[in-house]
Image: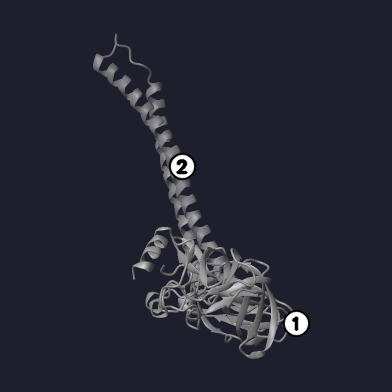
Amino acid sequence: MRRWLVPLVLLAGAGWLGVRTLRPGAELRDVPVFTVVEAPFTRAVLAEGVLKPVKTTVVSAPSEGREPLMIAWMAEDGDPVKKGQVVVRFDALEVTKRLADGQADRAAADSRIEKEKTLSATSVHERDRTAAVTREELDGNRQLGKKDPRFFPKAEVIESEIDESLFQKRLDHARDARQIEEKLGQSRVDLAAIDRRKAELYQKQASATLKQLEIRAPHDGTFALQKWGFRGTLHAGDRAFAGMRIAEISTSEQMDAEVYVLEADAGGLTVGRQATVVLEAQPDVVWKARVTHVDPFPKPRQPEVPAQYFATLLEIEGKTAGLRPGQRLHASIVLDQKPRALVVPRQAVFRRDNDNIVYRRSGGRFEAAKVKIGAGTVGRLVIAGGVKPGDQLALRDPTLSADEAVGAHGTRGGAPGGKP
């Protein structure tokens, strides 16, 4: 017993990086091994999505007016339409009421303008009449002449001077008041003119909207309703605000694939990556594609689900005429591809003291060696350095028995990021 305890203690003190022999009682043949060879390596991610037409025309609610319009009728989602065909029809009742309100407001503004002009003219005329009377009284007082204190009592002389000063003040006040009344009247007329212009604009918008209550297809294509997240699509009876996007009319001459890649699987997803697309309606046909756009930030597809996805656009090669927008599809995007690489099972790589190691077989024992890891999939890893073709690697920790390895890891091997 003591003869093998001393070497074991010395080996444990030297650290993990070195030669580790099997424990007494364990046999070398009990450790499964994997022989390193060069092989092609491909890492791809699966994504789901729909067909998206390249050429589309947006169908929006009329941009005139501020009030929403009620949708009375519209084509069904996915219906084929012809050029000039009515695809959306709005309710005319509310627009007709707005037009009548605009006409009434304009008539009221015109009446107010005439009223303000009449009141202003009356006030100015009243000030002019007061000024004329005051001027006559001032002239009459001046014609009598200034009373000489030598011949008139002092009280009459003072009263005469006060009357002349009073008449002059009243005349100046009448002139100033006339100017104020004139400006005030003009301001009231201008305010009423503003209300008139507002009524004219409201009436003009209602008239323009009344002419756009029917939206017709600008060209042949497929009518596809705009999807608004958790709100879904618009339906008859809903209200559409000015300029609101309602649907699209798309052609099937050329289709792209819009797919959603889970954020955790999107490492290496860039423009230019190759992909393949399979439609659910045509599972036996495989289309080649290429990544042309990746959203800069991930977003959840459903508000109640926290998972985030990168919206990705794939350009499909070949003729896609005849396919319908919105058809569901599955895509496989190649994120990493190497014609020759050292690929090993993930359970052959272990994590020790923040280093990735493998146990390499050397004669009748296993040696721990640091390795550099490249790309990987769920079950395989690319070794970028530390091993060479022909090396035999342990698929479980050889320093433990089979039962201990199962108890320590729950499996017969390890993986980067697992428990040491």
| Residue at horizontal 33 percent and vertical 15 percent from the top | 147
Query: Residue 90: horizontal and vertical position, in percent?
Result: 54, 79
Which circle's residue, 2 or 1, is located before the other in the chain?
2
Residue found at the far top of this picture: 150
Amino acid carrying mark 2 in the image? Lys
Number of marks in the rendered image: 2
| SS under mark 1 | loop
Vertical order, 108 against 320 (above or below) = above
From the viewer's side, name the closer residue of 391 and 337.
391
Does the image show residue 290?
Answer: yes
Instruction: Name the residue beneath numbered marker 1.
Output: 319
Quarter of the N terminus within the rendering: bottom left
Q: Quadrant of residue 179?
A: top left
Q: Identify whether 348 is placed above or below 371.
A: below
Residue for badge 2: 183
Residue drawn 49% across the image and 50% down it: 190
Looking at the image, the residue that sits furthest to the front is 3
User: Is residue 337 visible to the viewer in this orientation of the structure?
Assistant: no
How does the figure colour the protein chain or chains?
A: one colour
Position of residue 407 measured from the top left corner of the image (x, y, whole percent): 37, 78
Is residue 142 positioned above or below 353 on the image? above
Neighbourhood count class around disc 2 (C-alpha, 10 Å): few under 14, some 14–19, many 20 upward: few
Q: Amino acid at mark 1?
A: Lys
Under tag 2, what secondary structure? helix
